Image (spheres, rainbow, N blue to C red):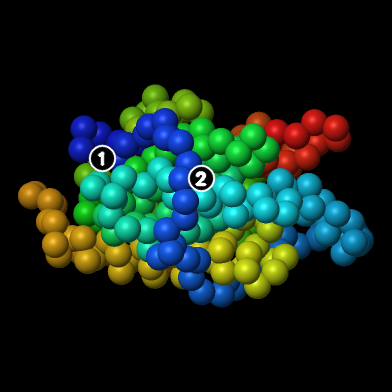
Amino acid sequence: MSAGEGAAGPERQQPSSPSSRPEDAQPAGRAQPPGERPAESGAAPEDPSVKHFKMKKFFVLRPGTLDQAIKDVEALVDKEVDGSIQSIWLMAEVDHWNNEKERLVMITDNSLLVIKYDFVMFISEQIQRIPLNFMDRISYGTFSFPKRSLFQREGEGVRVYWDRLREPSFTSRWNPFATDYPFITFTYHPVTNLSDSFAALCDIHNFRVKLKDAAEKVHAMKPVPGKANGVLVLNQPILIEVYVGLMSFLGNQNKLGYSFARGNIGF
């Protein structure tokens, strides 16, 4: 479900104007390709040329687009609050209704920054700032759903928690726009297998390692009173509590959460 915050939790804000790219920003590591969804029984595999054509519809693949986007989001870093940029990632956020949303993610000295970026208009539309010293748990594994859920997803993800004592309310669980969840979930961006550079940029496993290391450093330097120091890492299924999921199924199939060319119209 959508990640939110309490009084001392993550911060959502509107971004500022872009500036130049710091030299210490870099993607890290090679990604292991996510598992492909098996073909339905009796269905022929998709032609590779058709699949490649579909991938080219992502605006992030247009020449120069990603470089410009990285410059824009790097300008959102507040040096006094966040410190220096450690790494930048291209991912898909999965909300509590199983909707995929394209995101640029930055790990800095003190914060995890999750940016909603419009690759069509080159605009940073929203930024969520999560202090690393509030993080207490990182879980990773394959996605799981309730037994009676009608729609499910293949693959694996990483979920980051920052308030283990707070549970989402019943109202929030049924509200598709809820923002009071004390965790956020990421999975592979669809373009991860197109090249080595995108594989590194979308590698959720290396992201998990880098995030844990950064969070533990901040826990040691800036402990939060009343919170246990350190980050617990768990290998376990990532539960998405969706029982029907028709809207997320249609949205994900049509890539509504991405900057994606749709006929003569781009979102």
| Dot 1: element | loop
Q: Is residue 267 visible?
A: yes
Residue shown at 21%/60% (left/top)? 218
Q: Quadrant of residue 180?
A: top left
Q: Is residue 12 above or below residue 71?
A: above
Residue 179 place in picture, x, y as percent: 40, 31
Residue 230 place in picture, x, y as percent: 20, 64
Residue shown at 55%/40% (left/top)? 117
Crowding at mark 1 (Cα within 10 Å: few <14, some 14-19, many 20+): some
> What residue is shown with label 2?
72
Q: Is residue 17 above or below residue 138?
A: above
> What residue is shown with label 1?
9
| Dot 2: element | helix
Image quarter in which the N terminus is found? top left
Q: Is residue 171 above or below residue 266?
A: above
* 41 with respect to 139 (left or right): right
* 158 with respect to 253 (left or right): left
Q: Earlier in the sequence, mark 1 or mark 2?
A: 1
Amino acid at the residue labelled 1:
Gly
Residue 42 place in picture, x, y as percent: 90, 59
Q: Is residue 260 above or below residue 85?
A: above
